[in-house]
Structures are given as C-alpha cells and as structure tokens.
Amino acid sequence: MRPGQWHLTEDLDGFLDRAGIFLRSRPALHTIPLTVTESLRKRGVDAYGAEAPVFGWLEREGDVHAALFRTPPRRLVLTPLTTEEAGSLAEHLASLGDPLPGVTADHGTATAFAKAWQRHMGATPLLHERQRLYRLGALTSPEPLPEGRGRVAGEQDRDQLMCWYREFVEAIGEVPSMDASSWADTRIAYGRVRLWQTPDGTPVSMAGATPMVAGQIRVAPVYTPAHLRGRGYAGAATVEVSQAALAAGAAEVVLFAGLSNPTSNGLYQRIGYRPVTDFALYDFSCGEPEAG
C-alpha cells in the first residue's frame, strides 16, 4: 500500500477542519494532539511560543490516516504510523531542510521515525524517556487513604502551584508549556488542579487535568515534592482529580507515567488505570546526512 501524501500547514483551523474527525476517532490515543490543539484554539497560536506551530496530516484516497504537530522548540508529535509511513514523512521533512529536536509518539512510530531521520539527516536519536499511556477503568481509592482531604486549588494556592510547576518541569527535563504564573492562573480559573492537604491544611501533593476534548480528559501533572513522597499523597490527589473528571462527564480519563518509575506505574494500576500503549520520546543530536 502506498504511504499517501503528507500535507503541512500553519493554519490551525484548516488542520482541524481536515484532521479533526480523525483525531476524535481515538480520543485516548490522540490525547496529546487533541489537548494541545484545543489549547492553541482557545489561547491563540502563540500560546506555546513566538514561533508558529506546524500541523500536518497524511491523506490517502481522500481519507486522513495520520496527523502531526509541532510547537517549536519542542519535539515533533506523531499519531501512529507504519514503518513505511514514518519513513516517507522523515524523507519529506528532511527535504525541507528544517532540523528537528526530537520526536514523541507511540513506541513503534517514534522508533521508526527516529531511525529514518538518522538515515536522512545524520542526527543520532537519543532515547529521552519511555512512557506508558493509561486509561481509567473502575476507579478505586487506595486503602488506607493518608490523613487529610482533597480540595480544589484556589487563589490562595497560586504561589504553591507556581513553585510545584517549576519543580515538576525541571524534574522531567522538559520545556515548560508556559510560564509558571500563567499556568497557575489558568488552572485556578477553571478549577483544574486538585490538592491533597494534611489535617492542618498544608498542601502536600497536586494533580491537574486538561480540559475535556472529544470526551477525554488527561490527568497531568501529578506532583509531590521529593521529601513528601511515599506517604500516599499522590494517589489520593490522583483519585480526587479522576473523580472530578468523571463527574464532569468524561468518557475517557487518561494519563502518562514514565516507565523508569515503577512506583507511579504500580500506583496508577492499583487505583484503576489500565495500560493502552507505550510511548517513546527521542532527542536528536546534530549530525550530517548520509552520503548518497
């Protein structure tokens, strides 16, 4: 089967008109492009930086079979591709001459694209992280729950949220999606962070959530300061935000967990999250394309 034709654009509305139905056909698997494009639609195309985002779709016989986006300076994000499709995309992007910092996709797609990109551009792929995508089944509160209670983060928590957001981004080694103050203000305004607090009212963990798109909500980020871990706070906060997502009408609640952290993976499965598929995040070093 021929890999089809790739179309690239900086026109968000045009991209969603063409690829929106495809993205909504698998909300859990397409959670990243769905939530990012929704954020760009609401906040403007400069929401993630001054450089224009790029979008694309793979078309074959009039139907969309895959999609991509990139918000510079971040990695290219891909929906699932065959090895042949990943190769044709790498060849097409290489012909444009623009370097890429890396790629994020399901493990098979990311690995196939990384190998093809190395072949065409000479850039060595370095595995940054492997993640597992989980979907919520039956939510189960951990037993016993830590002392305290959950609550919605409010204006009084702004400084705490800003601090924890900075610590979270630094811990995972990623480019922040926005400055800490904007991140905190947006989530406070829409009630999208749940805190777990001790009986004396001290916040000890947070769990955030994306807006609902195509019936799905993604739990992110989940963060507990290092000195407070191992006490059940993250599990309690995650249950709180998961319950809120279900109460809001989400048909699917999903989250990512780094596979290098068996503690968090075990926790999410104990409270009812089930594996969907594994993702890989590659960074590309500078290099030269192969001769010939």
Image (cartoon, grey):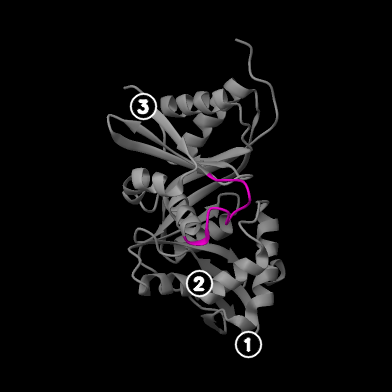
Tag 3 or tag 2, which sits nearer the N-term? 3
Q: Which residue is mark 2?
A: 192
Overall secondary structure of the magenta section: loop
Q: CA separation, marks 2 and 3? A: 40 Å
Q: CA separation, marks 2 and 1? A: 19 Å
- Circles 2 and 3: CB atoms closer than 8 Å: no
Q: Is residue 271 above or below residue 15?
A: below
Q: Is residue 46 magenta?
A: yes
Q: Is residue 224 above or below residue 63?
A: below
How many marks overall?
A: 3
Residue occupying the far top of the picture? 292
Residue 224 visible to the viewer: no
Secondary structure category for the residue under label 2: loop
- How far across and down, in percent of the image, does residue 130 sit? 56, 45
Q: Is residue 163 left or right of residue 144?
A: right
Residue at 60%, 26% in the rendered image: 97
The mark found on residue 172 in the picture is: none
Q: Which residue is mark 3?
A: 4
**Depth order, front residue of 139/107:** 107
- Circles 2 and 1: CB atoms closer than 8 Å: no
- Amino acid at circle 2: Arg
- Amino acid at circle 1: Gly
Residue at 53%, 48% in the rendered image: 131
Q: Is residue 69 magenta?
A: no
Tell me which segment is drawn in magenta. Answer: 42-53
The mark found on residue 201 in the picture is: 1
Foreground disc of the pair 2, 1 = 2
Tag 1 or tag 2, which sits nearer the N-term? 2
Mark 3 Cα-neighbour bin, 10 Å: few <14, some 14–19, many ≥20 = some
